[in-house]
Image (spheres, grey):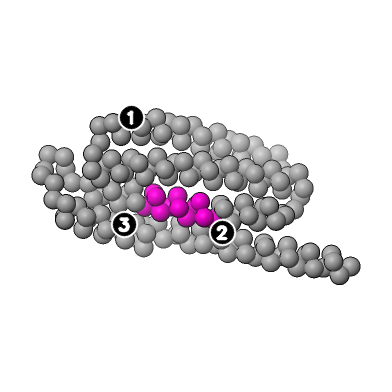
Amino acid sequence: MKRINSIFWIVATLVVLQCMLFWMRGLMAIGYSEGNELWMWIFKILTYLGIATIGVLIYRIKNTFDTKGFFNENNVQQLRSLGIVAFITALLNSLANACMHSNISKHAPANLGKTNELFYTALAEQVLDQSLITYILIFSIILLTYFTQSALRVKGENEAFI
Protein backbone atom coordinates (compact mmCIF):
# COMPACT_ATOMS: atom_id res chain seq x y z
CA MET A 1 0.00 0.00 0.00
CA LYS A 2 2.91 2.35 0.66
CA ARG A 3 4.11 1.93 -2.92
CA ILE A 4 0.65 2.78 -4.28
CA ASN A 5 0.47 5.88 -2.05
CA SER A 6 3.93 6.99 -3.19
CA ILE A 7 3.04 6.54 -6.85
CA PHE A 8 -0.28 8.34 -6.29
CA TRP A 9 1.40 11.40 -4.77
CA ILE A 10 4.16 11.53 -7.40
CA VAL A 11 1.57 11.44 -10.20
CA ALA A 12 -0.65 13.95 -8.37
CA THR A 13 2.26 16.36 -7.98
CA LEU A 14 3.16 16.08 -11.67
CA VAL A 15 -0.46 16.63 -12.72
CA VAL A 16 -0.82 19.71 -10.50
CA LEU A 17 2.42 21.20 -11.89
CA GLN A 18 1.34 20.48 -15.48
CA CYS A 19 -2.09 22.06 -14.88
CA MET A 20 -0.61 25.18 -13.30
CA LEU A 21 1.93 25.63 -16.11
CA PHE A 22 -0.69 25.08 -18.80
CA TRP A 23 -3.21 27.45 -17.19
CA MET A 24 -0.59 30.22 -17.06
CA ARG A 25 0.43 29.60 -20.68
CA GLY A 26 -3.20 29.39 -21.81
CA LEU A 27 -4.27 32.57 -20.05
CA MET A 28 -1.39 34.46 -21.63
CA ALA A 29 -2.21 33.04 -25.09
CA ILE A 30 -5.87 34.06 -24.86
CA GLY A 31 -4.80 37.71 -24.92
CA TYR A 32 -3.42 37.54 -28.45
CA SER A 33 -5.48 34.71 -29.97
CA GLU A 34 -8.57 34.98 -32.13
CA GLY A 35 -11.03 32.71 -33.92
CA ASN A 36 -10.49 28.98 -33.61
CA GLU A 37 -7.17 29.49 -31.86
CA LEU A 38 -8.92 31.44 -29.09
CA TRP A 39 -11.52 28.70 -28.71
CA MET A 40 -8.76 26.07 -28.68
CA TRP A 41 -7.11 27.75 -25.70
CA ILE A 42 -10.43 28.15 -23.88
CA PHE A 43 -11.28 24.45 -24.41
CA LYS A 44 -7.77 23.40 -23.35
CA ILE A 45 -7.96 25.46 -20.15
CA LEU A 46 -11.33 23.90 -19.37
CA THR A 47 -9.84 20.46 -20.16
CA TYR A 48 -7.12 20.97 -17.58
CA LEU A 49 -9.71 22.22 -15.08
CA GLY A 50 -11.56 18.93 -15.69
CA ILE A 51 -8.33 16.98 -15.15
CA ALA A 52 -7.83 18.76 -11.81
CA THR A 53 -11.43 17.96 -10.83
CA ILE A 54 -10.88 14.29 -11.73
CA GLY A 55 -7.80 14.32 -9.50
CA VAL A 56 -9.78 15.68 -6.56
CA LEU A 57 -12.51 13.05 -7.05
CA ILE A 58 -9.93 10.24 -7.25
CA TYR A 59 -8.29 11.55 -4.08
CA ARG A 60 -11.62 11.55 -2.23
CA ILE A 61 -12.44 8.02 -3.36
CA LYS A 62 -8.94 6.81 -2.43
CA ASN A 63 -9.10 8.54 0.95
CA THR A 64 -12.42 6.90 1.84
CA PHE A 65 -11.18 3.50 0.72
CA ASP A 66 -7.96 3.91 2.75
CA THR A 67 -9.86 4.80 5.94
CA LYS A 68 -12.86 2.44 5.67
CA GLY A 69 -11.55 -0.33 3.42
CA PHE A 70 -14.72 -0.48 1.32
CA PHE A 71 -16.99 1.64 -0.86
CA ASN A 72 -20.15 3.31 0.40
CA GLU A 73 -22.98 5.25 -1.26
CA ASN A 74 -20.97 8.46 -1.14
CA ASN A 75 -18.22 6.75 -3.18
CA VAL A 76 -20.76 5.60 -5.75
CA GLN A 77 -21.85 9.22 -6.21
CA GLN A 78 -18.20 10.30 -6.49
CA LEU A 79 -17.51 7.52 -9.00
CA ARG A 80 -20.53 8.61 -11.06
CA SER A 81 -19.31 12.22 -10.93
CA LEU A 82 -15.86 10.99 -12.01
CA GLY A 83 -17.36 9.35 -15.09
CA ILE A 84 -19.40 12.42 -16.01
CA VAL A 85 -16.49 14.84 -15.48
CA ALA A 86 -14.17 12.53 -17.44
CA PHE A 87 -16.66 12.47 -20.34
CA ILE A 88 -16.99 16.27 -20.35
CA THR A 89 -13.21 16.65 -20.11
CA ALA A 90 -12.62 14.28 -23.03
CA LEU A 91 -15.23 16.13 -25.08
CA LEU A 92 -13.60 19.49 -24.29
CA ASN A 93 -10.23 18.07 -25.30
CA SER A 94 -11.70 16.77 -28.56
CA LEU A 95 -13.19 20.23 -29.21
CA ALA A 96 -9.80 21.87 -28.52
CA ASN A 97 -8.02 19.47 -30.86
CA ALA A 98 -10.65 20.04 -33.54
CA CYS A 99 -10.12 23.81 -33.22
CA MET A 100 -6.38 23.30 -33.51
CA HIS A 101 -6.68 21.14 -36.63
CA SER A 102 -9.17 23.48 -38.30
CA ASN A 103 -7.22 26.65 -37.57
CA ILE A 104 -6.49 28.39 -40.87
CA SER A 105 -3.30 30.40 -41.23
CA LYS A 106 -3.60 33.89 -39.76
CA HIS A 107 -2.14 35.34 -42.95
CA ALA A 108 -4.87 33.90 -45.19
CA PRO A 109 -8.28 35.59 -45.41
CA ALA A 110 -10.78 33.81 -43.18
CA ASN A 111 -13.39 31.67 -44.91
CA LEU A 112 -15.96 30.88 -42.24
CA GLY A 113 -17.66 28.12 -44.23
CA LYS A 114 -14.37 26.34 -44.85
CA THR A 115 -13.34 26.77 -41.21
CA ASN A 116 -16.62 25.30 -39.94
CA GLU A 117 -16.35 22.36 -42.34
CA LEU A 118 -12.78 21.67 -41.17
CA PHE A 119 -13.86 22.00 -37.54
CA TYR A 120 -16.74 19.52 -37.77
CA THR A 121 -14.61 17.07 -39.75
CA ALA A 122 -11.80 17.31 -37.22
CA LEU A 123 -14.24 16.93 -34.30
CA ALA A 124 -15.78 13.79 -35.81
CA GLU A 125 -12.29 12.40 -36.42
CA GLN A 126 -11.29 13.16 -32.82
CA VAL A 127 -14.34 11.54 -31.23
CA LEU A 128 -14.80 8.58 -33.57
CA ASP A 129 -11.17 7.72 -34.29
CA GLN A 130 -8.36 9.30 -32.32
CA SER A 131 -10.04 9.45 -28.88
CA LEU A 132 -12.36 6.47 -29.18
CA ILE A 133 -10.53 4.38 -26.57
CA THR A 134 -10.82 7.29 -24.12
CA TYR A 135 -14.59 7.37 -24.52
CA ILE A 136 -14.81 3.59 -24.15
CA LEU A 137 -12.84 3.76 -20.89
CA ILE A 138 -15.08 6.56 -19.62
CA PHE A 139 -18.21 4.53 -20.34
CA SER A 140 -16.53 1.63 -18.50
CA ILE A 141 -16.19 3.89 -15.43
CA ILE A 142 -19.88 4.76 -15.67
CA LEU A 143 -20.76 1.07 -16.01
CA LEU A 144 -18.55 0.28 -13.00
CA THR A 145 -20.58 2.84 -11.05
CA TYR A 146 -23.77 0.89 -11.68
CA PHE A 147 -22.09 -2.40 -10.75
CA THR A 148 -20.82 -0.86 -7.50
CA GLN A 149 -24.24 0.58 -6.71
CA SER A 150 -25.87 -2.83 -7.29
CA ALA A 151 -23.26 -4.55 -5.12
CA LEU A 152 -23.92 -2.10 -2.28
CA ARG A 153 -27.66 -2.65 -2.60
CA VAL A 154 -27.22 -6.45 -2.44
CA LYS A 155 -24.85 -6.06 0.52
CA GLY A 156 -27.45 -3.97 2.33
CA GLU A 157 -30.16 -6.55 1.62
CA ASN A 158 -27.94 -9.34 2.90
CA GLU A 159 -27.16 -7.45 6.08
CA ALA A 160 -30.85 -6.74 6.61
CA PHE A 161 -31.66 -10.45 6.13
CA ILE A 162 -29.10 -11.54 8.74
According to the picture, the residue beneath numbered tag 1 turns out to be 28
> Label 2 to label 3, Cα distance in Å?
23 Å
Rendered image quadrant of residue 152: bottom right
- Asked if disc 3 and disc 1 are in contact, CB closer than 8 Å, the reply is no
Which residues, given as a range, are shown in magenta?
83-94
Is the stretch drawn in magenta largely helix, strand or loop? Answer: helix
User: Disc 1 residue type?
Assistant: Met
The residue at the far left in this view is 109
Vertical order, 75 against 109 (above or below): below
Task: Choose the circle earlier in sequence order: 2 or 1.
Answer: 1
* Residue 62 visible in the snapshot: yes
Does the magenta segment cover residue 22?
no
Q: Secondary structure at mark 1?
A: helix
> Quadrant location of the N terminus?
top right
Q: Residues within 10 Å of mark 3 (few under 14, many from 20)?
A: many
According to the picture, the residue beneath numbered tag 3 turns out to be 123
According to the picture, the residue beneath numbered tag 2 turns out to be 141
Q: Secondary structure at mark 2?
A: helix
